[in-house]
């Protein structure tokens, strides 16, 4: 029996790197060798929990699950009935298409493994092929960049809109890139970490705000002009607010600054928050738009990432070999220690 190494949730705050049976593809499947896999905030959530609740377990018991839903790699085996994929294809994955559960999020398989079985493999549905001009580590950004793209799509931002993105993590920076590629004239990024703001400028943000030291409403008014809410009270001329931070302060800052008819897109997983100022939302007729996942965007982004891969590469702060997976997850678990960690397997170029 051939085996492989795979990362699973361990005790609270820890991973286990275990030997498991290497999957064997059926006639409709392909086997991919993982060359890079990103670590997501969702992985961190599972580690803080020490696993995932099992529907079959009594009393909400937690079970260990394989991690990794941001993989990129190359196909090494192809089932007899697969006609649109071949050995050697470099592919990214739609983790939500797996029939045995979402890859790396409670499903049977995880992408933070040496190999990954793609069940019922169909090009354009379960995987997408990307060109060999794109490094595997950048290709592994495909899934989070689809999340960011959906948020921008939900915003319906027009070139004439003035936009602020709260949070200069991977999703916020990805949204910034998509907004600029969409032709949006002015995009501001707000965060509390200076290094993140520097990255925001390097990927195309027109201005940044350090929300730890600057007055957001005043700075947005300076950048986007002065407008008013429905009662005529002075507000910033910002049209769209994108919350990629998930902090309660973002809602408060948005409501304080929002002009009449502004929109707020919520893409970040929300932390427990204080009461929202609903009256303040009313005074601005602020539209709240939720953005979850990537209903259509998972492979819409693939070719554009390829075209602009040098720009997207700036989102990766750490590239850690799979042999040091524990260190990679420790970095991600430590607030402020890393922005985007991608684990690499062998020669990831």
Image: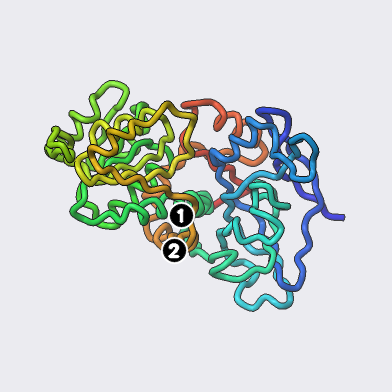
Q: Residue 176 in the image: x percent, y percent?
A: 33, 46
Query: Looking at this view, is 257 or 38 the one in front?
Result: 257
- Establish if 200 lies above or below 298: above
Query: Looking at this view, is 320 or 13 the one in front?
Result: 13
Which residue is located at x 55 percent, y 32 percent? 332
Q: Is residue 121 visible?
A: yes
Image check: 118 left or right of 188? right
Identify the residue position indicated by label 1 in the image: 146
Residue 74, labelled with which disc?
A: none
The quadrant in which residue 101 appears is bottom right
Image check: 291 left or right of 332? left
Identify the residue position indicated by label 2 in the image: 300
Q: Residues within 10 Å of mark 1 (few under 14, many from 20)?
A: many
Q: Real-space Cα distance between discs 1 and 2?
A: 8 Å
Query: Looking at this view, is 301 or 236 the one in front?
Result: 236
Local SS, label 2:
loop
The answer to whether the residues at label 1 and label 2 have Cβ atoms under 8 Å apart is yes
- Establish if 272 lies above or below 310: above
Which residue is located at x 31 percent, y 46 percent? 287
């Amino acid at each position: 029996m051939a085996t492989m190494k795979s990362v699973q949730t361990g005790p609270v705050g820890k991973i286990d790197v275990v030997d498991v049976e290497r999957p064997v593809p059926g006639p409709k499947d392909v086997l991919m060798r993982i060359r890079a896999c990103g670590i997501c905030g969702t992985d961190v959530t599972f580690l803080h929990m020490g696993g995932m609740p099992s529907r079959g377990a009594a009393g909400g018991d937690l079970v260990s699950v394989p991690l990794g839903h941001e993989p990129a790699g190359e196909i090494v085996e192809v089932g007899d009935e697969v006609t649109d994929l071949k050995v050697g294809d470099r592919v990214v994955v739609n983790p939500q298409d797996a029939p045995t559960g979402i890859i790396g999020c409670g499903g049977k398989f995880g992408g933070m493994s040496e190999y990954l079985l793609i069940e019922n493999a169909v090009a354009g549905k379960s995987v997408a092929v990307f060109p060999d001009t794109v490094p595997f580590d950048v290709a592994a950004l495909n899934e989070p960049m689809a999340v960011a793209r959906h948020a921008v799509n939900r915003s319906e931002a027009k070139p004439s809109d003035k936009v602020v993105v709260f949070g200069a993590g991977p999703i916020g920076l990805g949204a910034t890139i998509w907004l600029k590629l969409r032709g949006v004239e002015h995009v501001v990024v707000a965060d509390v970490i200076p290094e993140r703001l520097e990255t925001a400028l390097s990927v195309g943000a027109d201005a940044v705000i350090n929300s730890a030291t600057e007055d957001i409403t005043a700075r947005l008014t300076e950048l986007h002009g002065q407008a008013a809410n429905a009662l005529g009270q002075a507000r910033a001329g910002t049209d769209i607010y994108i919350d990629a931070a998930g902090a309660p302060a973002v809602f408060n800052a948005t409501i304080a600054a929002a002009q009449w008819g502004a929109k707020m897109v919520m893409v970040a997983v929300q932390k427990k928050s204080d009461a929202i100022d609903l009256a303040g939302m009313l005074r601005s007729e602020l539209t709240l738009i939720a953005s979850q996942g990537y209903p259509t965007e998972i492979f819409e982004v693939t070719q554009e990432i390829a075209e602009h891969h040098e720009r997207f590469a700036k989102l990766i702060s750490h590239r850690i070999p799979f042999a040091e997976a524990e260190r990679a997850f420790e970095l991600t678990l430590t607030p402020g220690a890393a922005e985007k960690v991608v684990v690499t397997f062998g020669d990831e170029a």
